[in-house]
Amino acid sequence: MGSSSGKIVIFTALPLEYRAVRERMERLRRVDHEAGTIFEVGRIGGTDWEVYLTQVGQGNQVAAVVTERAISMIGPEAVFFTGIAGGLKRDIPLGDVVVATRVFAYHGGKQEETFKTRPETWQASHRLEQTARYAALNPQWAERQVPAGQEAPEVHFKPIAAGEVVVNAGASVLHDLLDEHYNGVAAIETEGAGFAGAASMANQVHALVIRGISDHADGSKQHTDSGGFQHVAADNAAAMTIAVIRALLPAEAAKTVDTARQVAGSERTLGVSSPVGVHLENPLPVDWRRKLLPPWFSEVATLEVHLVPERNLRLPMRQMSQLKDSLVSVGRAEGVFTAGEAVSSALEADFAAAFAREPHRSGSVGLAISQSGQRSCWEPLPCPSQLCIPVLDSEHIKERIAVLLRVLLRLQEVPLTRYAPALAIDPAEILTVTSLGAAAVSNSATLARGGAGGPVHIPPHELWDAETIDAAVPMIAEELALRLMHHFRGPSDDRRFSGART
């Protein structure tokens, strides 16, 4: 599949797994396959993917049939199987998520004096596995997707086994077989082999299995099921699946970014500057977030992204009032706000806004449209629990700028005018510049800029029409991120921030 179809299919086996995914989708409609398989088609907020969802029932055979049928009918770029599984490792707690790096069909073999295994095995798509690892590095993935009050799960990248037996016994011949021949397997389920096998026969369709651990396959299933762990595991697996889709770039977009980088590299070699928007001698005036909504007294470093119109659009108050009511629903649909958090809205003479100030966020997240037509969006930088200080990660910030730019373009119908992107970190006194991966295993950090200085602003210096911004989001986001990171480069500071919890 040389180009992006813009389509993804998510398969589930059980009703609770289906519902866990469905409640994270929007604008759903029904589509029937000629053989009778029913799909619901919708969107994931903050992405351009068209997502098909179906429930196949239990078993590898039916999973294989429906997977082949869906790929043939829909022509997706990627397919996912998500749901619950039994855990085979005691160090992986109930509710945690396992992303399958490999799927074993463990029932194949030859019976002689001893049973000799002849398993089939399928490797996870490298592209999807890498995207999942990238998504899991961001501690905010669970905040955005896991219901409020539910503990965020750990994500494990391990092989899984798939057969035709639901295992619920602490000691059995099957347990002995798995322990002897598949000791590295972290979970066991009954659809992954059929799904992975069918996907492997399709031409370049990327496939990934994501499971939440609902029991330990040790005879305690009735107890864990009655304790609600099936629902927790299904919810967490669905949340991780959505997080991966949010982080997944379509093949053409990834190719465009790579080509743009190659072109930019060639132009630098030739002494020619990279393509940019229409340069402005003087940057356009910006209503920074602090002017619209003064920061909360305990807010952490916050990223804000703005699209400033070339001309003042002078939106009428009637339209501003309508926008106030729609910003909350649009924010939820686009993933800016979680499904369960309380969102406030405000209408002033010169702007309309929707925002959430929740303790678990350590800051505020929101959307705003000024009467001038400026569009604004903001969210706190990630703050790993081990470090307890906001982290500015160059790769993560580039990804978030791209996501927020797309959100801003979808806030309302875009008028026929050009926009200049602007960026800020405010407050910017307490944060560290490092990768999220390094921050997750560290308990101390260097304060960027020595903990001094006020907000960091990247003013709007280039004009783009909205269509061009939408098409060039990855390149624009990369340029803005580079300019932002430049402000945090300087002599290293000896002051250390210790955030380890005892």
Image (spheres, grey):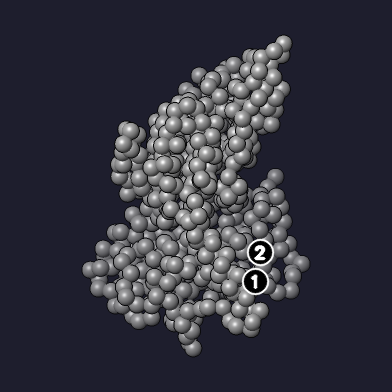
Which residue is located at x 30 percent, y 64 percent? 323
Quick one: label 1, few (<14), some, or many (20+) residues within 10 Å? Answer: some
Sequence-earlier tag: 2 or 1: 2
Q: Are marks 2 and 1 in contact (CB under 8 Å)?
A: yes
Q: Secondary structure at mark 1?
A: loop
- Residue 267 circle label: none
Q: Which residue is mark 1?
A: 488
Pick the residue in front: 423 or 256.
256
Which residue is located at x 60 percent, y 70 percent? 262
Q: Which residue is at the far left?
A: 318
Q: Name the quadrant containing residue 73.
A: top left
| Residue type at numbered disc 1 | Phe
- Residue 433 circle label: 2
Residue 399 image point, x, y percent = 54, 61
Residue 209 image point, x, y percent = 54, 38
Look at the image and tell me in which quarter the C terminus lies. top right
